[in-house]
Amino acid sequence: MAEERPYAWRNPWFRWSIVSLAVLTVASFLIGFIVLPSAQRDFTTGDFWETICRAAGLPANWGTPPPSGDRAPSTTVILAPAMGVRGAGDAVGRGATIAVQQCSMCHGAQGASEANAPNLAGQYPEVVIKQLLDYKHGARSGSFMQTLARNLSDQNIDDVARYYESLPKARTAPARYDETSAPALVRVGDPLRNIAPCIGCHGGTDHKFGAPWLEGMPKEYLLIQLKEFQTGARRNDSHAQMRNMTRQMTPAEIDQVADFYARREKG
Amino acid sequence: MFLARKLVLAHFWVAFAGFLLAIILGEWQMYVRSPLHAWVNNPEHYYRSVTAHGTVMAYVLPTLVAMGFGYAITELSLKQPLIGVRWAWAGFWLVVGGTVIAAGTVASGQASVLYTFYPPMIASAFYYIGVVLVVVGSWIWVALMSVNLRAWRNANPGATVPLAMFGNVTGAYLWAWTSVGAAVEVLVLILPVALGLKDTIDAGLSRVLFSWTLHAVVYFWLMPTYIAFYTIVPRAIGGRLYSDTMGRVAFVLFLVFSMPIGLHHTFADPQVGAGFKFVHAAMTAMVSVPTLLTVFTITASVEIAGRLRGGVGLIGWIKALPWDNPMMLALAFSFVMLGFGGAGGIINMSYQLNESVHNTQWVTGHFHLIFGGAIVIMYFMIAYELWPQLTRCAPLPQGLIKAQLWLWFVGMLVLSMPWHLVGLLGMPRRMAYYDYSDAALHPQAWTVVASTFGGALLVISAILFVYVLARARPVGAAVPPFTFSMTAHPGERTPALLNVFGLWVAMMIGLTVVNYGYPIAQLALLKDTSVPAIRIGGP
């Protein structure tokens, strides 16, 4: 018997392998791209070619933005990692000059407020930059802050942020987050209500870029912000992150969380 | 003749040491998440552990077992000394070095991204570099398998490659092509971000590239087990392999179909077209064919053993089987778990049914049952079978081995069945914390306790496994030579096409291009698809 040649059309194994694979492939593409899409109403809005394109993952209206209504985007600031870089000495110096003149009246000489304005000492620079830009562009409202921010150049804003970053943070977090030291919402959130734990973004177990340092903030300030996020009065949070977190919180929970972060340093 | 003994032993010991550490981490995860223990109050610790558990179990253990078993098969089945022993050691040290780097990075909390990477989460670059070293080390093994086979062919022109070596090289080629997807993902998309050269990443494209690797890697894990089914089990239980040809058909079908089907992992991903999802689902269904062929062939082989032992009648041969033989027990356990896991897998791969289980604990249950259960239980048997050859030890204690297998089987069912159940009820996977005080979750709390106990049985079984291997001491007497199964039809002529790889590798690559080419090209060419990276373990 002659030696069987593997790669020859006359070899039935070769022939049948190729033909079966080709048939299977063509059949699954026909079913996936033509038969099934034409049986599904939302796939058959356009013509034949459009149907195939949609099945391939190419919507016909690619690039057309969805109708956004008449509401302005909640924020136009894009958080860039460069915002979080520690500033040089001269930037801190320039920032200090501006801060003493324009900010210290409410936010305190050392960035710790006695007037229910937020603490800024040690605040992450990207947070200060984003909030000032949002005030400047009208994404966050506040009569004092909008007026003040409008007159700050981007460089000024950057310098102020570097200055506040250089000041020591208020530290009031417990040595260990557990059942005795922090409310459940702070530690573990409430997964069944889609509320993430505060410490997942605001420091504790993790810090997410753009999330502010909260420890030692005035309680009244935190209460107002949480309630405004809840009602949508404040809406400059990227991707509605805080609006989504606060939506299902009860007044008691809001009070409890604000109380936790507003604790004063011991001693 | 078995010269690569030290090499194989080194692979196995590192694999099993990692396995023992990783299984303890797994049990810790179950315990702290269960109502038996107060919540650890730091999800990062949980995800750090999950990352280590997954990385060792999914990459290090199966890769080292496949490599070590592959080197053993090369010498034992081809009956020629392993060519490239120095290269093999280089590959081994790359895998070990990569493992140490990756594990150290994970342990330091810089890489809690889970072993499937999940961009836009970005870990420390060292984690990815470690994983890449593991893969590069295994590529050396792929090349050596090819080189050794070629040398054997040159020395034995026209001869049929032994089935064990045929399966082994199939696994090697499958792995080589499979690992390309994740390699591209890591080298082109992830590492530039991890190294700080970029701040954004195309998460959609990353996921599609990972899916290229994610499913076929399962069949790479499975290959040593199937080789053991075909070439060790029939001999070990005193039977004959029913069909050598069927084994080859199963192996080449895995080569062709396990690769271009990974998009069934992205059914919920909006960036992939529904048409491609269907095509991948249809071809995923095809990989059940080689598994069903295998179940049939091996059951037929077992029947031969039963009838050779005097079993008669429709089911009389089952009673006549050597049930006191650990291999018989392991095979039965493996098939039961393969049956449940396979049936669950068919639900996962169905485009519509997947909706109800996607990202639930069902999926965790599925892959533990089929990989940790059906596949790993045969890794144990491979080690037990090879151990006398590797260490020249006396026969291993059969009673302890059987106890170990029973514990593994029962433990795996008790671990994974509750996961399947709560998955159907909607319990999400990858959760660090369950709030049992919530009225909706409270009734499901017992399932987590059950899984914790199942996991405890697995830990005991794993300790027993390592104990049996560790207490083996060399004896003076020569061990009998290792043999593979004989076929029921020794004169059977192997079709020429089932003795070569060219067509099957060409089909594997061709089908990948057809099934993945457009989705990858489309996503790669789309502009503005990147999202900000989320750095894990940062300040």
Image (cartoon, grey):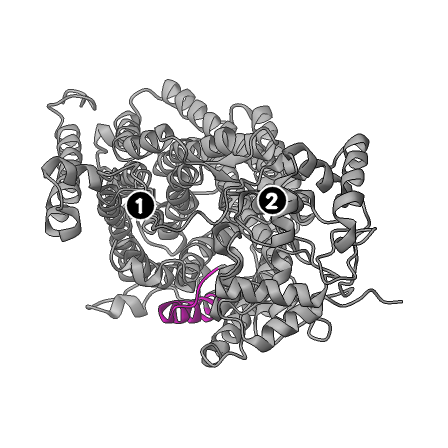
Quarter of the N terminus of chain A within the rendering: top left
Give the magenta range.
B410-429
Determine whether B382 is above or below A219 in the image: above
Left or right: residue B359 compared with residue B293: right
Residue B49, quarter of the rendered image: bottom right
Residue A95, quarter of the rendered image: top right
- In the image, are marks 1 and 2 on the same chain? yes
Left or right: residue B252 compared with residue B32: left
Question: Which numbered circle lies on residue A66?
Answer: 1
In the rendered image, is residue B536 in sight? no
The main secondary structure of the magenta stretch is: helix
**Cα distance between the residues tagged 1 and 2:** 26 Å
Residue B441 position within the rendered picture, expressed as x and y whole percent measured from the top left: 47, 76
Q: What amino acid type should be assigned to the residue bearing mark 1? A: Pro
Count of numbered circles in the view: 2
Label 2, residues with CA under 10 Å away: few <14, some 14-19, many ≥20: many
Task: Please tell me which residue lies in front, B170 or A97.
Answer: A97
Determine whether A151 is above or below B150 in the image: below
Determine whether B327 is above or below B452 in the image: above
Q: What amino acid type should be assigned to the residue bearing mark 2? A: Lys
Residue furthest out toward the top = B154
Question: Which numbered circle lies on residue A130?
Answer: 2
